[in-house]
Image (cartoon, helix red, strand yellow):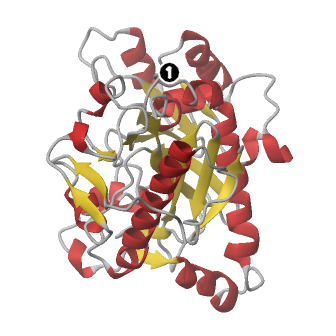
Amino acid sequence: MWFSNNQADTVYCDRNSDNASAILADLDLRFVGFPEEADLVWMRKGYIRQFGNLKEYQLLNHVPGERAMTNKGHLTRHLKKPDQEPPDGISLDEFYPETYCLYMGGDRDAFFAQLPPQDVRDNLWILKPAYLSRGEGIHILWQFDQLKSDLQNPDQNLSILEPGGKYVIQKYIQNPFLLQGFKSEIRIYWLIACLDPLLVLVYKEGTTRLTTQPFQLEEFDNPLVHIANSYQQKQHPDYESFRLKWSFSELESYITLELKLADPGFIEDQLKAQIKKILRYVVHSAINTLTRKPPQGLFFGLFGADLILDDTLRPWLTEVQKGPGLSHSDPVKKQVIPPMLQEAARIVLEVQQRKRKGASLAKLDSVDGYEWMINMA
């Protein structure tokens, strides 16, 4: 069992963190009213001003350089850095769809240069705002004249882009693995528990999100077909009547027992091993930015990673989330989110206490449901 102080650790949650506060309330923690009073500060908004104000061993639930991963444009630029020697021997084109940052001249020119002379319907790309989440601002395109016009005339009336917005465009995965005919997306939860030394773990359980309408590739303008994000799917008038979350065990049974597309143990032995490689690549590509930090304070981050399986069961990374949804009203998330977050809190509090005592971080007693991805201790 991990060692703790004689008195309960203190935690501050801002007013935007009701889900986190409710989950952390089940731990042996004492809530305080101001961030400067807390051992662990948890904030959804306004956290940037805390970066330079933390005490020596005070914990904050954000990594100062996390935008290197959570902004789609920054993620793309870091992943595409030339001459990288990432761990595990995995290559970028094995897990990240071809992607261009349209706000960068070289990338923008390269995107238009690779297009065929004539637009064809099976050359599908997905346009995403680099700075937004929840599936907002997304367009699926196979015709590009209007996009080119918007980019060339940003001060005129725009049809596709938002004024001043930064966008990435990514090759659309046209052969998604379907769950009973519906498109789906896997959400993985993972934790950067410490920056110095770098400690990164992934939680053993995740969730699978489905769309409310069956997959029809050519329904390009229908987010209920193409975007599995819950925020988009809630637009369906009968949203509450759908069962839109599967557990990993249900996904495993569907793949291995019902469809017999893989041997039992597929998720544990193959899929999770591949996802760990992908996330190590992500961290490795952004390492120089991630590990820059103010002189005081301890920084950690709880992240989501969204991946789509194609019909060969290969996972494709679509984005990294800095604030993975902690709501847990549905039965699947109720089994995953509270224990995941509570263990993350125990882990980072143990890191804090070991640092105070000068103890080794090579092994943490709090690690149970999490699995190591990187341990530089």
Q: Residue at x 51, y 38 (%)?
A: 142
Q: Residue at x 24, y 81 (%)?
A: 241
In which quadrant is the C terminus drawn?
top right
Q: Nearer the viewer, residue 229 or 205?
A: 205
All told, the count of numbered labels is: 1
The three-letter amino acid code for the residue at tag 1 is Leu
Q: Residue at x 26, y 74 (%)?
A: 329
Of all residues, the one furthest to the right in this rendering is: 89
Of all residues, the one furthest to the bottom in this rendering is: 257
Q: Nearer the viewer, residue 19 or 366?
A: 366
Tell whether 263 sits left or right of 190.
Answer: right
Q: Position of residue 42 (x, y in %)?
A: 30, 47
On screen, residue 325 above or below 131: below
Q: Does residue 235 appear in this view?
A: no
Q: Nearer the viewer, residue 157 or 241?
A: 241
Q: Residue at x 58, y 66 (%)?
A: 367
- Residue 46 image-quadrant placement: top left
Q: Does residue 363 appear in this view?
A: yes
Q: Which residue carries the number 1 mark?
A: 102
